[in-house]
Image (cartoon, grey):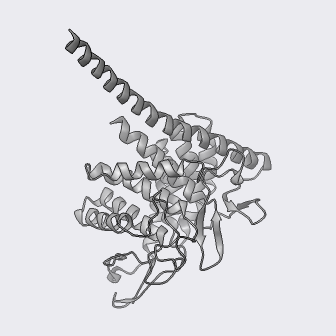
Amino acid sequence: MKTILSALGLSLLILTSCGGQKKVEVDFIQDNIDNAVAQNTIQTDIIEKSGKILNPRTINEDGSISYIPMEDWCSGFFPGSIWLTYNLTGDKKWLPLAEKYTEALDSVKYLKWHHDVGFMIGCSYLNGYRMADKKEYKDVIIEAARSLSTRFRPNAGVIQTWAADKGYHVVDYDPETGEVRKRQTAQGYADESAWARGQAWALYGYTTCYRYTKDKKYLDQAQKVYNFIFNNKNLPEDLVPYWDYDAPNIPNEPRDASAAACTASALYELDGYLPGNHYKETADKIMESLGSPAYRAKVGTNGNFILMHSVGSIPHGQEIDVPLNYADYYFLEGLMRKRDLEKK
């Protein structure tokens, strides 16, 4: 009888522990959803009261909100964050706001001089197409893709940005031969350094390429990027990187929460393709850091952005240790992907 009671007690302890763990996970997601709703409510109230369609990107030196025109490469991220807020909450009050801020970007589909049209249209129109079955957005997405495709010569080959140990920001091809003329980094420390957000986008980009092509070579590249990042001696314990892994004054260099958020979001998707490689566990650790007071702003502060401590471009002296709309976008996307993985 004593043995049976002991076994029963052990079983209850295990069940209680499992239930407690699940509650912690659920509370983390909900807590961050609630925080995002609070910040985005303040942000959108300001916009709606202005009578204009404003697009917040970051804060100015005096703490005021910096708004951008639709041609700015970051213009798709804030509408995208509103789509993600709608998806995370299921609250239909966000739907007309997401639609309005997205449709303000309509003319972006004609841009031929901008290499970031994918960000601008993908985060706004493509999210609306997916999340709200906005079939009318399909034509905008197709036109943007057609416009973007005319910017590249067929014989220039596939852009390959991955070297043995890092990704390059820009690869300059000869338009006639397709030969590589130069590999360089515009916003990192140096051409041969490892710019943190560049590594994050490489991981994210190769994972996305696999989603659409199912070509294993993209998974292989994504894994190489992962191994580079998480075996790097200069990666901090909280997994939020310095702005460049080779920045000269580490550990006295700014962190980049935007790179961490992008990395976490990519890892949740990668885990769906390659489970059992600890990608989700790594993403969870990053998200826990970003959701902590060290990086998540108090409601009503930080220009009403969610995350603090991101970096735009240190070589250009721009957006250093500030909130950035794309940091918030990838953090919210990470929350959505984490939620969806844990439902399975």
Q: Quadrant of the N terminus?
A: top left
Q: Is residue 121 left or right of residue 18?
A: right
Residue in the foreground of this view, choosing between 45 and 53? 45
Residue 46 locus on image (x, y percent): 75, 47
Instruction: Please state the horizontal and vertical placement of residue 117, each as a whole percent of the image.
Output: 51, 66
Q: Position of residue 161 (x, y in %)?
A: 37, 76
Visible residue check, residue 140: no
Residue lying furthest front in this view? 2
**In the image, is residue 45 above or below residue 124?**
above
Q: Is residue 196 visible?
A: yes
Residue shown at 64%/69% (left/top)?
320
On screen, 65 above or below 317?
A: above
Give residue 326's quadrant in the image: bottom right
Front residue of this view, candidates 169 and 23: 23
Residue 164 higher or lower than 129, as above or below: below
Residue 71 vertical placement versus 307 (above, below): below
Which residue is at 33% across, 90% downward? 177
The number of numbered badges drawn on the structure is 0
Q: Which image quadrant: the C terminus? A: top left
Q: Residue furthest top?
A: 1
| 280 with respect to 246 (left or right) | left
Q: Position of residue 69 (x, y in %)?
A: 68, 64
In this rendered view, identify the residue nearer to me: 197 or 281: 281
Viewed as shown, does residue 337 lie left or right of 80?
A: left
